[in-house]
């Protein structure tokens, strides 16, 4: 299948973004809580998928959670503690750019936790997620799939583009020879944590644009009917003649020319 063109992507995503806006208003007005986990290999398209959501929604309602490596104090906490602090309150949305599943993937493969700790996590996480769902949280877990050949192309783009170089981390370099280890860890994770109350959905993200459309369509289809009537706003007229803002006009600077 040919990759979506920019025009085709906009044509398909625009009506979905309107539905997403309706869903966000339903979440706010009815006090719902939405959690979306974005997981997958490096370069799979997590950031672009999250931006599709966050660029459309009110940032006071929709929060992106992308946690750094844990501090020494956080390493001594209950594992889920620092993630639980970012769960939404009523009317809010939390988008996790990687989540508590770090322990099943990068921590396990890179040796940041023991085999025993990783297995203990896999036993604990279904019950942790059951508590969330039983408490009324709408929980969606997405794994974005990316072939190794496509991943290599995207790494090369990051390596050769100064504006994208920040996306490369020391962990990316260390993980170069562990593609199969990550595959094995993912399969173990899916086996242990794909549950009736919190199932995984795998998205083909080799074409990132098509993957974003597929993910958003899936999420909207699984939410309840979120269409609410739009309240009429009585917009008051300006009283008096109005004021004029005073400001100082800056002269334009000469064009910047790099040395």
Image: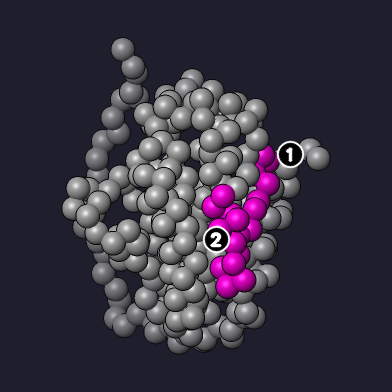
* 77 sits left or right of 231 in the view: left
- Classify mark 2: residues with Cα within 10 Å, few (<14), some (14-19) or many (20+): many
State whether residue 160 is above or below residue 95: above
- The location of residue 145, given as percent across then percent down, is 63, 44
- The location of residue 10, given as percent across then percent down, is 67, 51
Q: Nearer the viewer, residue 229 or 109?
A: 109
Residue displayed at 26% across by 36% down: 251
* 258 sits left or right of 191 in the view: left
- Magenta span: 188-208
Q: Which of the numbered marks, if any, corresponds to residue 3?
A: 1
Label 1 sits on a secondary structure element that is loop
Which residue extends farthest left? 73
State whether residue 149 is above or below residue 188: above
Label 2 sits on a secondary structure element that is helix
Q: Is residue 193 magenta?
A: yes
Snapshot quadrant of residue 170: top left
- The location of residue 183, given as percent across then percent down, is 58, 40
Work out how far the residue at label 2 is from the one at label 1, CA to CA, in angstroms.
Answer: 32 Å
Which residue extends farthest front? 116
State whether residue 178 is above or below residue 96: above
Residue displayed at 56% across by 50% down: 188
Q: Nearer the viewer, residue 31 or 37?
A: 37
């Amino acid at each position: 299948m040919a990759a979506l063109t920019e025009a085709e992507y906009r044509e398909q995503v625009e009506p979905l973004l309107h539905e997403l806006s309706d869903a966000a208003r339903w979440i706010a007005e009815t006090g719902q809580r939405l959690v979306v986990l974005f997981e997958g290999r490096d370069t799979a398209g997590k950031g672009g998928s999250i931006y599709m959501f966050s660029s459309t929604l009110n940032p006071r309602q929709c929060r992106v959670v992308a946690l750094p490596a844990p501090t020494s104090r956080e390493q001594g906490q209950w594992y889920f503690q620092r993630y639980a602090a970012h769960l939404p309150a009523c009317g809010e949305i939390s988008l996790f750019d990687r989540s508590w599943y770090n322990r099943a993937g990068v921590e396990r493969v890179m040796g940041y936790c023991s085999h025993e700790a990783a297995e203990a996590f896999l036993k604990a996480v279904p019950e942790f997620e059951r508590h969330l769902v039983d408490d009324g949280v709408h929980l969606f877990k997405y794994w974005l799939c990316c072939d190794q050949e496509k991943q290599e192309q995207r790494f090369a783009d990051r390596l050769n583009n100064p504006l994208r170089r920040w996306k490369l981390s020391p962990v990316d370099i260390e993980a170069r020879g562990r593609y199969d280890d990550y595959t094995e860890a993912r399969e173990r994770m899916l086996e242990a944590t794909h549950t009736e109350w919190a199932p995984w959905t795998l998205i083909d993200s080799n074409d990132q644009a098509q993957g974003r459309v597929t993910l958003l369509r899936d999420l909207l289809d699984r939410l309840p009917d979120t269409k609410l009537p739009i309240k009429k706003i009585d917009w008051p007229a300006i009283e008096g003649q109005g004021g004029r803002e005073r400001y100082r006009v800056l002269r334009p600077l000469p064009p910047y020319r790099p040395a």
